[in-house]
Amino acid sequence: MEHTHKLVGDERRAALLTWLRESNQPLTGGDLAEKAGVSRQVIVQDMSLLKAKKEPIIATSQGYLLIDQHDQTHKCQRIVACKHTPEQTQQELECIVDQGVTVGNVIVEHPVYGELKALIMVSDRHDVKQFINKINSTNAPYLSELTDGVHLHTLEAENEEKLEAAYLALKNNGFTIE
C-alpha cells in the first residue's frame, strides 16, 4: 500500500513495523523510504530508534527483517573458521549454500575494535549473487580484508548432516583453518 503523504515520527515507525511484520523477505532501506515518503537516512535512524526500544529488527545484506522470537525453529548452528581472498568469496559462499545451509554472519577480530560481526543471511545462490553484486556496486571492502582473509561464519541448517556437508565442502576447497 503506497502512501500519498509523508509519514512522520511514531506513525512512520509503526508503519515500518507493520511492513516488516507482513513481509516474508527482507525490505531494503530504499524501499521502506519510498513507501514512507522519506529519505533512506530517515529510515536508518528510525531502525536505530526501534532497535533501541528492543524491537527484534536485524539488518542483513538484503535488507531489514523483523524476527518473530516466538516462532524460532530449532536450527542447528556451527561456527567455522575460514580464510580466503576476496576473489574467492563467491565460491566459498556457494560451497555452503549448495549444501542447504544458511550463512548467518561473518565475524572478524579487529585489533582495535575487537569482534566485528555483520549479518549476511545468504541461503541460496541467488542470495550469494545479490550479496556479491552489492559489494561490487558499492565498492565496499569485505570484512575479512581487515584480517588478511581470516574470518568466522555462523552456519545454520535443519540438521547436523547439512552442517557437516558444508564444512567438508569448505575444507575440500581449502577454505577452512584447522
Image (cartoon, grey):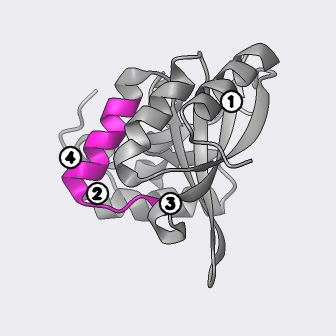
Across and down, in percent, residue 93 comes to: 48, 34
Q: Secondary structure at mark 1?
A: helix
Q: Residues within 10 Å of mark 4 (few under 14, many from 20)?
A: few
Q: Earlier in the sequence, mark 4 or mark 1?
A: 4
Tag of residue 5: 4
Helix, strand or loop for the magenta stretch, by majority: helix
Q: Earlier in the sequence, mark 3 or mark 4?
A: 4
Residue shown at 48%/36% (left/top)? 92
Of 149 and 121, nearer the camera is 149
Q: Residues within 10 Å of mark 3 (few under 14, many from 20)?
A: many
Mark 3 and mark 4: span between their CA atoms? 42 Å
Across and down, in percent, residue 26 comes to: 44, 33
Of 84 and 80, nearer the camera is 84
Mark 3 and mark 1: span between their CA atoms? 18 Å
Q: Nearer the viewer, mark 1 or mark 2?
A: 1
Q: Earlier in the sequence, mark 3 or mark 1?
A: 3
Tag of residue 40: 2
Across and down, in percent, residue 37 comes to: 22, 49
Residue kind at label 3, given as amino acid type? Ser
Residue shown at 31%/61% (left/top)? 140
Mark 1 and mark 2: span between their CA atoms? 38 Å
Q: Earlier in the sequence, mark 2 or mark 4?
A: 4
Q: Look at mark 1 in the image and give the residue it sits on.
A: 167
Which contiguous range is marked in magenta?
128-143
Q: Look at mark 3 in the image and give the residue it sits on.
A: 144
Query: Looking at the image, can residue 159 be seen?
Result: no
* Horizontal arrangement in the rendering, residue 29 relative to residue 102 (left or right): left
Q: Secondary structure at mark 4?
A: loop
Mark 4 and mark 1: span between their CA atoms? 50 Å
Label 2–label 3 contact, CB within 8 A: no
